[in-house]
Image (tube, helix red, strand yellow):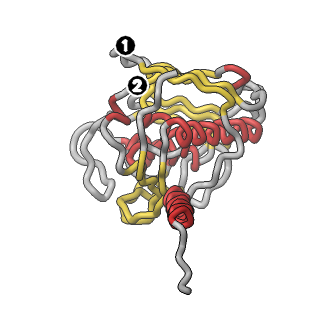
């Protein structure tokens, strides 16, 4: 007599296959650290002020924050690296109070760099968990060829001062960047935000430096990174002040493709 699979077995098999496909599509490791409790409420204030501050037990508190900011924080990327986000991800804003699963020390000037980086890494994992659990996020990392900038040493050599002892910090304002004790990897991360595309540190320099430069924002530049006519661009400032240059090219860049994301239920 032929074997007849019971409908329940078929359903179970289908569920297992669906779960496997979903896990493969998500393709990110399950966070080791999570928030124990998280309150998420819509913010209808129509203001532009956004706040990220420590929350209960060293967790996280945000006000008037859109989901794109949560995504870029969770995965340590820029918004141009998030692909497939629906419009509400940028438009809708939330207030979140999240309690950490274990006590976290508040970052400060006396915290060692490795301790601070480890703390931020745990917070990023917790935010990933919040997005997975409460926003039903399914996201897949990919590497795609895209326009990037390469940071190189300019003709004549670098004009950089190695940092003295002291807590590292970086402040970025419109048209001005000031850094103390920062690496050029830190600089390229900042430049990625300013220029809206990945910037790779190809200088070979690994020390920590103090540097400061100013530029005129929104000044046009040619596609190869050479300044156009008019006021100095960021390309000019980097070359003249730091002895570095930016070269435009095509290269691999990491992106995260959203396959599913839903508005969280209020609680």
| Residue 201 appears in the figure | yes
Q: Are marks 1 and 2 in contact (CB under 8 Å)?
A: yes
Residue at 65% in and 54% down: 206
Residue at 49% in and 30% down: 172
Extreme-top residue of the structure? 45
As displayed, is residue 121 above or below residue 11?
above
Camera-side residue: 197 or 37? 37
- Please state the horizontal and vertical placement of residue 238, each as a whole percent of the image: 44, 45
- Please state the horizontal and vertical placement of residue 262, each as a whole percent of the image: 42, 39
Residue at 44% in and 34% down: 67
The disc at residue 93 is 2
Direction from residue 48 to residue 39 in the image, left or right: right
- Please state the horizontal and vertical placement of residue 48, each as a whole percent of the image: 37, 19
Q: Residues within 10 Å of mark 2 (few under 14, many from 20)?
A: many
Precedes in sequence: disc 1 or disc 2: 1
Residue at 70% in and 29% down: 100
SS at badge 1: loop
- Please state the horizontal and vertical placement of residue 194, each as a whole percent of the image: 40, 40
Q: CA distance from mark 1 to mark 2?
A: 9 Å
Extreme-left residue of the structure? 229
| Residue 156 appears in the figure | no
Q: Quadrant of residue 250?
A: bottom left
Camera-side residue: 221 or 128? 128
Direction from residue 232 to residue 191 in the image, left or right: right
SS at badge 2: strand
As displayed, is residue 117 above or below residue 199?
above
Q: Quadrant of the N terminus?
A: bottom right
Residue at the spot of label 1: 45
Camera-side residue: 212 or 140? 140
Extreme-front residue of the structure? 1
Q: Residues within 10 Å of mark 1 (few under 14, many from 20)?
A: few
């Amino acid at each position: 007599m032929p074997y007849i699979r019971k409908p329940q077995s078929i359903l179970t098999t289908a569920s297992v296959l669906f779960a496997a496909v979903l896990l493969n599509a998500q393709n990110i490791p399950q966070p080791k650290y999570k928030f124990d409790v998280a309150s998420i409420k819509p913010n209808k204030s129509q203001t532009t002020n956004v706040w990220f501050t420590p929350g209960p037990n060293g967790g996280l508190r945000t006000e008037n924050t859109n989901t794109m900011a949560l995504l870029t924080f969770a995965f340590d990327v820029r918004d141009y690296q998030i692909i497939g986000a629906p419009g509400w991800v940028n438009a809708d804003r939330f207030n979140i109070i999240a309690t950490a699963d274990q006590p976290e020390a508040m970052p400060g000037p006396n915290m060692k760099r490795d301790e601070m980086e480890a703390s931020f890494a745990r917070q990023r994992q917790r935010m990933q968990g919040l997005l997975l659990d409460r926003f039903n996020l399914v996201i897949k990392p990919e590497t795609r060829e895209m326009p990037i900038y390469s940071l190189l040493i300019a003709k004549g050599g670098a004009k950089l001062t190695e940092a003295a002892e002291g807590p590292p910090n970086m402040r970025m304002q419109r048209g001005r960047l000031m850094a103390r004790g920062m690496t050029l990897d830190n600089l390229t991360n900042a430049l990625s935000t300013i220029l809206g595309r990945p910037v790779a540190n190809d200088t070979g320099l690994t020390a920590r430096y103090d540097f400061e430069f100013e530029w005129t924002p929104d000044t046009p530049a040619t596609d190869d990174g050479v300044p156009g006519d008019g006021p100095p661009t960021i390309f000019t400032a980097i070359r003249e002040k730091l002895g570095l240059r930016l070269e435009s090219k095509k290269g691999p860049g990491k992106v995260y493709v959203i396959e599913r994301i839903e508005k969280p239920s209020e609680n």
